[in-house]
Image (cartoon, coloured by chain):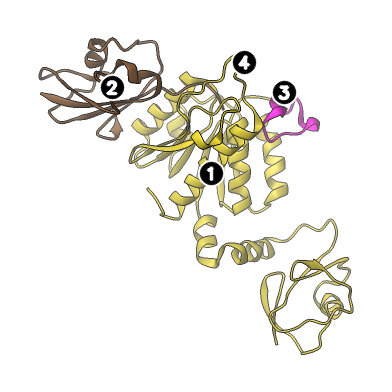
Amino acid sequence: MIINLKFFASLRPYMPGDKDESWVDVQMETNVGEVLDYLKVPPDKPKIYLLNGVHADRETLLKEGDVLSVFPPVAGG
Amino acid sequence: MKIFLNEKPLEATIGTTIGALASEFKPGADVLIVNGFPAKPAHTLIEGDHAVLIRHGEIPGGEEFDALLSARHTPGVHRKIKHSRVGVAGIGGLGSHIAVALARIGVGELILADFDVVEPSNLNRQYYFTDQLGMDKTEALSQTLRRINPNVTLTCHNTRLTPENIPVIYKDTPVLCEAFDVAEQKAMLVQTALSTLENIIVVAASGVAGYGTTETLGIHRLGPRLVVVGDLETEARENMGLMAPRVGVAAHIQANVVLRILLKEES
């Protein structure tokens, strides 16, 4: 199944291609954490996960056409 | 003729002076202002003039303060802001300025949380003063906010926010500002708020350090309930400190996003 990826800031280099968004083909029953591991996204970066604009976590299962956004906030305030 | 006294409409006799108005409505007023300029007691008012009478050191009452804000913002806008509640998580460089901006526009209730005390290193960007060093930030900021707007209801939590207490502290809060410093804490707050507080909208910040151009401080809508302000990349670290101008701009962008949400200009 195809899912849409949107990685922000320092996570962008881990997204396939060189654009603002990308698509990957993953197997059914794949979760958010497995996709990120497959793309070699470092697990130690603090992250906010959104699936179709709604909160998700690493265990959330993906389905065809989902949009996975991952955002790593940086220090400062 | 119709004039405005402290922003409230008033029918006055033609030829009335500002001094006569002061004798009738605010005896002892020592600052007389007509249409934004200081005036002498003998100044004659004309139709449509805005007169303001001030006694040095006197704090405006709730009704008078309401009238001032209503005149500035229009009654419909003021009513919406006054009946709103906003959470601010962390009251350092971002949060203290957000809270001040929201108190100035008349937000009805602010829910503030921070476990920190005011330190000398905070004074380069945070809304605290030298005579507040050592005070709990919640107490210090409460003092300041009450001086700005005595009508605002303040609910302060002098505690560290955690996944356990965030759903309790910000229950029934429609808009929450993420104003932390540490990246892990920012992620924790956003993840916890979005997963446990139904319908809450989080206005977060990321990438506000340094003195790079403020033109890169954007508003990023990552979902229907998450807005992130900042350049997303400029992290606070050695040789890239947090400084008043850029942090202050980001905080006021956050406050303006909140205002637009309260006024239903965006969701």
Nearer the N terminus, badge 1 or badge 3? 3
Image colour for chain B is: yellow
Which mark is nearer the camera, 1 or 3? 1
Task: Point out residue B122 in the picture as x, y percentages from the top left corner.
Answer: 69, 26
- Specify start and end residues of the magenta stretch as a single range: B120-136
**Residue designated by label 1:** B255
Contact between marks 2 and 4 (CB within 8 A): the answer is no
Nearer the N terminus, badge 4 or badge 3? 3
Q: Bin the neighbour count of mark 3 within 10 Å (Cα to Cα): few under 14, some 14-19, many 20 and up.
A: some
Q: Which residue appears farthest toward the bottom when viewing the image?
A: B14
Task: Point out residue B263 in the picture as x, y percentages from the top left corner.
Answer: 45, 55
Q: Quadrant of residue A31?
A: top left
Disc 1 element: helix
**Residue designated by label 4:** B239
Distance Cα–Cα, label 2 vs label 4: 30 Å
Disc 4 element: loop
Q: Residue A18 bears which disc, if any?
A: 2
* Tag 1: amino acid: Ala
Distance Cα–Cα, label 1 vs label 4: 28 Å
* Tag 4: amino acid: Asn
Do the residues indicated by labels 2 and 3 lie within the same chain of the protein? no
Q: Residue A62 bears which disc, if any?
A: none
Residue B209 located left or right of residue B162: right
Distance Cα–Cα, label 2 vs label 1: 34 Å
